[in-house]
Image (cartoon, rainbow, N blue to C red):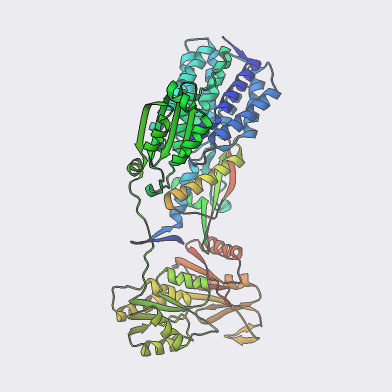
Amino acid sequence: MSIEMKNDYGTIDITNDVIAQVVGEAAIECYGIVGMASRHQIRDGLTDILGKENYAKGVIVRNIGDETHIDMYVIIGYGTKISEVAYQVQSKVMYTLKKTLSLTVDSVNIFVQGVRVTN
Amino acid sequence: MNFIDGVKFADMVRMGAHHLHQNADYVDSLNVFPVPDGDTGTNMNLSMTSGAKETEANVSAHLGKTAQALSKGLLMGARGNSGVILSQLFRGFGKAVEEEEKLDSKKFANSLEYGVQTAYKAVMKPVEGTILTVAKDAANKGVEVAKSTTDIIKVMEAIVEESKASLKRTPDLLPVLKEVGVVDSGGQGLVYVYEGFLACLKGEELPERTNMDLMEDLVNAEHHRGVQGFMNTEDIVYGYCTEFMVKFEDEKVKKHPFEEGDFRQDLSKFGDSLLVISDEEIAKVHIHTEEPGDALNYAQQYGSLINIKIENMRQQHIDIVGESHSTKKAETASHPYAIVTVAMGTGIADLLKSIGASAVIEGGQTMNPSTEDIVKAIKDVGAERVIILPNNKNIIMAAKQAAEVIGIEAAVVETKSVPEGLAAILAFNPEAEVADNEKSMSKAAAGVKTGQVTYSIRDTSIDGIDIKKDDFMGLAGSKIVISNPSLDDVMKTLLESLINEDDEIVTIIYGEDVTEQEAAEIAEYVESTYDHTEVELYNGKQPLYPYILSVE
C-alpha cells in the first residue's frame, strides 16, 4: 500500500512504511511522548516500547479509497496532561507530513497504550 | 534575601504570570516550532495563569504546599507543548520542595534543576534549542552560583541572565529558528516568567514596554507572519520592505498637522504589513510596498527622513528558499501505445488508470462491452498500437474481434479478472514490441491468484457445494469454494484457500455494498492472521462483487 504522486518526470511512490517511520520520528520528538507502543500488545508483549526500527508497528496507515488515516499507539510520560500531549502529536504529525511529503491526511488518531512513571 | 517561604513564592508566581501575560503577543509572534500556528504565547499564558490562580487560592506559608498548588494548577491548565513543558518544570520543582517550609538559595536552585530533570524525562527525544534548553542552562547556572552565595536574589539574577543568554543561542541549536530569524518562543516565555520572579524578589515593578521598543518586535512579528515555508516568490505582491523614521519639522507640521490615524490611513494605500508608531518628535514607519519612493515622498511632507532601510524581499526570498520547481501534471492527449481495459466500478477504473491503463471501458459481469465498444475506446485514445485486457472471460471473444478489426497493431492478453488485469498492466513495458508485451503480461497475469465474492441468484449445487439463493459465494479463480449467508465466513474460507506460505501481497478491492469500516476490518484480519503478507486495500466501488481479491 502506498501513496503515489505524479509530476513531469514520472511518479513518486511513498510506501506506508516510510510514512509510518516519518510519523513515528515526528511523534517521539513531541514533548510528553516517551515511546511508541505496539498495536498488538497481546502478541508482542505488554506495552513494550518499540525501538526505532519498529515504529511502523505502532503506526498504522490506512488508505481507504483516496483517504488516508493514521492510527498511532503511544506511551506518554506520567504527570503530563495526556489530552494536550496527544493533541500536540496530532498537530505535529499533520504538519510534518505536509512539510516533508506534501501529504494531507484525513485523520490522525492517537491511542494511548500506557503511561511511563519515572521516579 | 536568604530564604523564601510559601507566601513570597506565591507573589513570585503572580508576578511571573503577569509579566508573561503582558508579553504573550510578542511570544506568539516568535512561534515557529513545531507547528506554525502562532499560539505559544497564548498557550503558555493560559497555562501559567491557571497555575497562578490555583496558587492564589491555596497560598500557604509552607513553601512546599504553595508549590504543590502551582504544580496542580499548571497541570490542569496546561495547553500546548510549551504549557505542558512549563507544567513539568514546576511539577519537578514542586516534588523537590514538597517537605520544605522555606527555601535557601541552594535548595531553590537545586529544585529548579530537579524540575528540569523531570521535564527532560517526559520526552523520548528532547529537542534542543527550545524552552527545555533555556530551562536547563538557567538552572545549571543557578546551581553553580548558589554554591558561593546564600542570597537568593543573586541566584535568581544569574538564572535570568543565563536564561536570556541561552535564549539568544537557541537559533544556533535549532535551524528552523535561524531560518526565520527568531529565538524560541517557549524559551522566551520562560524568560518572562523568570524575570517576573526576579522583579518580585527585588520588590521592583517591571518596566512596561515602550512604544519604540515595541516597533522592533512588531516588525519581527510582521515579517515572521509572512515567512511560512509554503510561499512562492511570485506570491509576493509588495516587494520592498521599507522602514524609516520621520523627524517632524515645525514648518512642515504647521502646513500638515500630523495625525497618526490619518497618516496611517494614507500610507495604507501604498502596501501592507503597515506599522506606525509615533510620539511628539518622531514617527516610525514599517511598510511592505511596491513603490517605496511614493511612501517616502508622502512621509516627507511631515519632516525629514532618517534611518531609511529598504530591502528587496523577492530577492531575499529566492535566496532563502531557492527557486521552487513547479510540478505540473504531464498532460498527454493521445496514447500512441495504449492499454485498453474493462472494469466495473469507478474505483477500479481509477485504480487501473492510475497504474497505466489508457482507457477503461465500463463493463463486467452483466454488461459486457461489445466489440464495437472496445473498438471505439481504442480509437478515442488515439492509439497506434494497443494491448487489450478484457479482465473477464466473457469479454475475451469481443476483445479478440476488436483486435482483428481495429486495423492497428493489437494484442489481447487474456485476463479473466481485475487482479489479473492489474498484474498485466504492471508488467507492461512501453519500450517493448506488442508481441513481447503480450507474452510478459500474460505471464504476469498467470502468476496472480484471484478470489471473488459475489451473491447467488438461485438455489443450486455446484462442485458438490450446496448454494442457496442470496448466499455469498467465494470463488477461488473460477472455482466455487464456499457458499454461506455470512460474508465474514465466506471471506475467511476464501482467504484460507487462496493464501499460502509463499504469498506476499494480498490486494483487497471492496465493492459498493461494503463500508470502509468493514473493509478495514477484513484488512486487519488478513494482516494479523497471515502476518507474512502485506495488505493493500482499494475502494473499487464495483457492484455485485463485495470483494475482489488478488494474492501473489
Q: Is residue B252 above or below residue B337?
A: above
Q: B340 or B234, which lies in front?
A: B234
In the displayed structure, does residue B306 sit left or right of residue B195?
left
In the displayed structure, does residue B213 sit left or right of residue B89?
left
- x and y percentages locating residue A66 in the rendered image: 51, 62
Residue sitting farthest toward the right: B57
Q: B315 or A30, which lies in front?
A: B315
Quarter of the figure that contains the N terminus of chain B:
top right
- x and y percentages locating residue B326 in the rendered image: 36, 55
Image-quadrant location for residue B470: bottom right
Q: Is residue B350 above or below residue B166?
A: below
Q: Residue at x 42, y 76 (%)?
A: B359
Q: B330 or B539, which lies in front?
A: B330
- x and y percentages locating residue A17 in the rendered image: 45, 55
Q: Is residue B298 above or below residue A43?
A: above
Q: B232 or B281, which lies in front?
A: B281
Image-quadrant location for residue B524: bottom right
- x and y percentages locating residue B495 in the rendered image: 54, 71
Q: Is residue B391 something that shows in the picture?
A: yes
Q: Is residue B353 above or below residue B209?
A: below
Q: Residue at x 44, y 31 (%)?
A: B285
Q: How many marks?
A: 0
Quarter of the figure that contains the C terminus of chain B:
bottom left
